[in-house]
């Protein structure tokens, strides 16, 4: 299929050509004609499938066809709700690129930064608004935004929205939208709470599904290294000795873990940066920009922060830990081998995570190739239930000791040694 077969107007075809896309991805081929017919869509698709363009291109066309005939300040016609700041920025950048030969104007709003410049952009008038829920509600309550003129509503990454606790925000936003509207709903997974939410939003939708979450892209080669918890950092450095790995996204389950990886790599003189929820917005943007520009080799991210990262041709993903939720593994490795590119995903597994590998292999219905020939093999056994309990108690004790020390130090001055934590 070609983009020319999708009844797209010339200004869009030209912008797509500028992006050097040769043909529509599966979701684009299916969704674009349906959205152009103004039908509701329930899209089951992960990032990496080209879903942003799948909804952006047709809404730009619908808006351009109406708004190019009107004069004056743009009226808000489309609202795209998305869970993270990174994702919001990337969607806006995509829309900016696709709409450059049309009349369509867009803006993006998200929390964690001052609202001034966002409000300035809105005052000039926009057709498409990309927003995270909190900042949107905030600006609505200040009377800066009204949703009364919206014709198309897009809820992106619905499953992640609910994971992040945005359900109440969404429930507040929905009644503010006009009843007569087109709605597009995208989610990587479809558990029952998501299906329920979609029913509140969509009318007679066309269901479009591409590569369900249990299937991993065929173009991704997966490898597994069994090791111990204490030898993971040595193993990571060992793997990064391979110069073929020019750029890699490393996943960490926790924010603190991500910072620790960066610190360890720094000692080994490997340039890296971490992005996670505790980092300020500008720090995250700076890290991402440097990574995209090839100035840093390793980007370490938590699952939520990584959700919005859009990096073309990312070949390597390393799971520093094996996630305990098998779907998370599928999402993570989906960051490599994007849009038909070949990818390589490596997982480092400590004894406590051995059982998670079994869950993952069950979900993806394939065995992950184990790399045995490396200097840090797994020699320890997973803890027994009794040992786990004792270890948790010990962790708790160290935590209390750490906070007690901190309190003592902050009241009495001087720096004592904090308890060591896992
Ligand atoms: P998304 O799933 O929207 O995050 O898009 C994944 C990546 O695929 C982005 O880097 C897009 O720029 C890219 N992309 C989107 N559509 C196409 C296409 N038709 N051909 C090649 N790359 C594409």
Image (cartoon, rainbow, N blue to C red):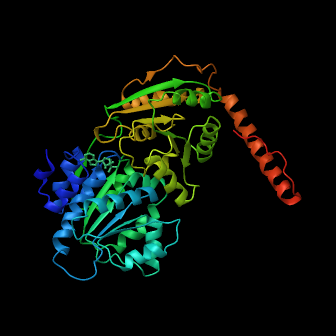
- Quadrant of the image containing the C terminus: top right
Q: Is residue 116 left or right of residue 33?
A: right
Q: Residue at x 65, y 37 (%)?
A: 267
Residue 87 is at least partly visible in this image: yes
Q: Residue at x 27, y 72 (%)?
A: 77
Q: Residue 311, percent across and down?
A: 39, 46
| Figure check: 380 above or below 21 | above
| Outermost residue, top side | 373
Quarter holding residue 180: bottom left
Q: Is residue 328 left or right of residue 272?
A: left
Q: Is residue 9 visible?
A: no
Pick out the residue farthest to the right: 412
Q: Quadrant of residue 107?
A: bottom left
Task: State the image coordinates of residue 32 (x, y, percent, origin top left).
Answer: 19, 55
Q: Is residue 249 left or right of residue 106?
A: right
100 over 271 or under it: above or below: below
x and y percentages locating residue 85 in the rendered image? 46, 59
- Asked whether 26 or 71 is in front, the reply is 71
- Residue 240, horizontal then vertical, whole percent: 52, 30
Choose between 85 and 83: the one closer to the eye.
85
Q: Residue at the spot x=77%, y=42% of the render?
A: 398
In-front residue for pair 178/67: 67
Q: Quadrant of the N terminus?
A: top left
Residue name at image x 49 percent, y 27 percent: 242
Question: How many dots with numbers?
Answer: 0
Q: Is residue 379 left or right of residue 292?
A: right
């Amino acid at each position: 299929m070609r983009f020319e077969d999708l009844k797209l107007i010339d200004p869009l075809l030209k912008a797509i050509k500028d992006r050097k896309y040769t043909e529509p991805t599966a979701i684009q081929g299916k969704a674009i004609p349906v959205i152009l017919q103004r039908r509701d869509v329930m899209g089951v698709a992960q990032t990496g499938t080209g879903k942003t363009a799948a909804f952006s291109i047709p809404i730009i066309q619908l808006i351009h066809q109406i708004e190019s005939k009107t004069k004056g300040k743009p009226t808000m016609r489309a609202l795209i709700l998305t869970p993270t700041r990174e994702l919001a920025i990337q969607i806006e950048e995509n829309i900016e690129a696709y709409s450059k030969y049309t009349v369509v104007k867009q803006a993006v709003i998200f929390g964690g930064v001052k609202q001034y410049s966002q409000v300035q952009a809105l005052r000039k008038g926009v057709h498409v608004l990309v927003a995270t829920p909190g900042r949107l509600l905030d600006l609505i309550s200040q009377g800066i935004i009204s949703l009364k003129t919206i014709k198309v509503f897009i809820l992106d990454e619905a499953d992640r929205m609910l994971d992040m606790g945005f359900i109440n925000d969404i429930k507040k936003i929905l009644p503010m939208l006009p009843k007569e509207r087109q709605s597009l709903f995208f989610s990587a997974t479809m558990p029952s709470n998501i299906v329920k939410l979609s029913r509140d939003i969509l009318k007679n939708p066309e269901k479009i599904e591409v590569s369900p979450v249990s299937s991993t892209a065929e173009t991704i080669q997966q490898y597994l290294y069994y090791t111990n918890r204490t030898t993971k950092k040595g193993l990571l450095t060992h793997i990064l000795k391979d110069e073929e790995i020019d750029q890699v996204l490393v996943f960490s389950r926790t924010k603190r873990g991500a910072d620790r990886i960066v610190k360890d790599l720094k000692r080994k003189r490997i340039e890296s940066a971490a992005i996670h929820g505790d980092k300020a917005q500008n720090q995250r943007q700076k890290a991402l920009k440097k990574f995209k520009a090839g100035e840093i080799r390793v980007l370490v991210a938590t699952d939520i922060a990584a959700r919005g990262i859009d990096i073309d041709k990312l070949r390597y993903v390393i799971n520093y830990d094996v996630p305990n939720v098998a779907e998370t593994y599928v999402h993570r490795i989906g960051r490599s081998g994007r849009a038909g590119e070949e990818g390589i995903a490596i997982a480092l597994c400590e004894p406590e995570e051995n059982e998670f590998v079994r869950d993952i292999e069950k979900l993806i219905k394939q065995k992950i190739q184990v790399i045995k020939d490396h200097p840090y093999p797994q020699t320890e056994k997973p803890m027994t239930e009794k040992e786990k309990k004792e270890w948790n108690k010990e962790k708790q004790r160290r935590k209390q000791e750490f906070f007690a020390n901190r309190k003592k130090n902050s009241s009495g001055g001087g720096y004592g040694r904090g308890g060591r934590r896992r």
